[in-house]
Image (tube, helix red, strand yellow):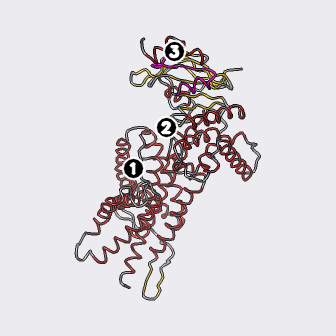
Amino acid sequence: MSAILEAKDLHLSFKGVKALAGVGFHVVEGEFFAVIGPNGAGKTTLLNVLSGVYEPDKGQVLFRGQNLRGKSPQARARMGLGRTFQGLEIFRGMSVLDNVKLGAELALPTYPPALPKAEREWRLRAWAEEVLDYLHLSPFRHAPAGMLPYGLQKRVEVARALAGRPKLLLLDEPMAGLSLEEKQDLARFLLDAREEWGITLLWVEHDLRAVLELSDRVLVLSYGEVLYHGPPHEVRKDPKVVEAYLGHG
Amino acid sequence: MSDLLPYLIGGLANGALYGLLALGFVLVYRATSVVNFAIGEFLLVGAYLTYTFALFLPLPLAMLAALPAAFLFGIIVERGFVRPLLGRNVVAVIMATIGLASTLDGGAQLVWGPDLKYLPGSLPNLGFQTGEIFVSSRAVWNLLLALPLGLGLLWLLRRSRYGILVRAISEREVAALALGIPTARILAGVWGVSALLATLAGALLAVASGVGPNLVFLGLKVFPVAILGGLDSVGGALLAGFILGILEALSQRYLETVLPGFTEALPFLVVLLVLLVRPYGLLGERQIERV
């Protein structure tokens, strides 16, 4: 198994405040990789650096062997780097189906180029419907996305990202604000998507139990530095992690 | 009644122009959150472009030729003035559009001079008389061009792929980026379309009453129209244009003799009253902040 993503010595400061101070890690193809850490640890900043919202001051990100420096968020998305956001970033005024179809357009270049336009449109729609069905969103396909309950809106955002057939999907706290049942549903959807579509997952999450149960490997950040990088069952035993989370005993 | 109708027809003719201009203004506001204080100057430049083309071409062709030129002008403005300020404070962008407005004002006077210019040639006369009522050619042309264009644009925004992309960007730009949507190109196009709409309004105005520096004052009308319709509502802009056109006509007919000058203040009064009842305008979307 090779690394799909490699981050080397990432540094980023905002007006003197160090958000990332030498963060390095790698994500193996096909794994479920978690990033955790206390508030303000730099988790979302890290996602923003990976997806191209910020350019790091120093260090580099390799995605499938390619250096991402200077690549726009759009270019990274087209290379197969998908993402969802903390807080909802769905198109509230559009139907659920239109949201997912917009996501699915990212995968258009994978269709045969000679395909007639009508056929392409049909396939796009069929694929969007498949994703909706997969995430049990079909009954809401024509509802304006903003009118759905919170848990479903979160699912729409995941569906939109999955529809673009990303190689690696970055998820920013996908479970925040969900009920236990909704969390379990989402976890199942994500694990299935990994199986079925071969998607590698990197998620930032606060729910420690979910992280330890689901993830293959874990990265723990604190104040922009890596505290731990390894399998989940040992993270609790790591003295530095215990200190960051629980303070001095 | 029959002496009121000509006023109403004139009101609709003006309303069509207000609607077009407000459409251009709201489109940019909705897609980019930029309040374009130079919209009146867009109209002015558009009118002068039409005038310049009309020196060489028959008028209908000149009006047609001015549209792609205006589109290009809009893109240049976006690239040169708006894009560099992306992500800056809202006030900075507003100040930039005000600066742009004075620059364009001055520039237009340098190029075309300060005096009123009449377009050579004219549009085919489409005026007609039914019974007692005379419908002017100006009213027919204004409605004939503004209504299909405005409604067509609404339809495009709602239904076309391009429209869906514009709405996606205007609603959630970060998400649009993450989906690989070429936001920069699309937003430049929006500015182009905005300039195109203002230019058509300017051309129609110029055909009716010539081109001079004071055309920009129509730009001031855009604010009451856009606010009345709802700043983020493209359909509302068109509707509010007609409403204000008609209200002005009514005021001209009934109030101007009693309260001279009232018509000038009317649009702003109407806005005040409407905002008391509907703070987001007639068709504007209610903003809910989720914290």
A190, above or below B235, in the image: above
Provide the residue designation for mark 1. B35
Residue B156 position in % (x across, y down): 57, 58
The answer to whether residue B213 of the structure is visible from this angle is no
Q: Which residue is mark 3?
A: A227
Residue at which label 2 appears: A87
Chain letter belonging to callout 3: A
Q: Earlier in the sequence, mark 3 or mark 2?
A: 2
Where is residue A136, by image quadrant? Answer: top right
What amino acid type should be assigned to the residue bearing mark 3?
Answer: Leu
Front of the two marks 1 and 3:
3
Disc 3 secondary structure class:
strand
The answer for how far apart the CA atoms under marks 1 and 3 are is: 46 Å
Towards the viewer: B75 or A51: A51
Considering only vertical position in the picture, is B232 above or below A80? below
**Which span is picked out in magenta?**
A207-226
